[in-house]
Amino acid sequence: VCYSGCRTPKMPVEPGLLSFLFCGFAFALSVIAPGMSFSTILMPLGLYTPFVEGIGHVRPEVLLPGVAGCVVTFICLANW
């Protein structure tokens, strides 16, 4: 049941290099920060399905920027 003010705004983002870098960042951040889910960030942006399907089908145009985003995030934000 949805009442008058409960619409979730969707901000679709075109899948591409920068968006998959962001997906990698969000994934790594969800590993570092307890309680955060990367799917919660990516679903409203419309990036969850293309990112997960790209990983599942081993597409390099998705995997390479995603891994790069993860590595940069781990290096910059994780406590060593």
Image: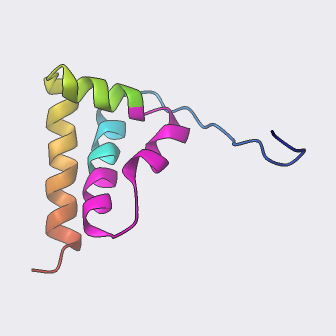
Residue at x-position 55% and y-position 32%: 12
Q: Magenta: predominant secondary structure element?
A: helix
Give the residue at the far left of this rendering.
80
Q: Where residue 77 sits in the image (x, y, percent)?
A: 23, 72
Residue 51 sits in quarter: top left
Foreground: 51 or 4?
4
Q: Where residue 58 sits in the image (x, y, percent)?
A: 14, 23
Q: Where residue 17 sits in the image (x, y, percent)?
A: 29, 33
Foreground: 61 or 3?
3
Residue at x-position 32% and y-position 59%: 30
Q: Does residue 27 show up magenta in the picture?
A: yes
Residue at x-position 15% and y-position 44%: 67
Q: Is residue 10 positioned above or below 33 on the image?
A: above
Quadrant that contains the C terminus: bottom left
Residue 65 sits in quarter: top left
Residue 50 visible: yes
Magenta region: 25-48
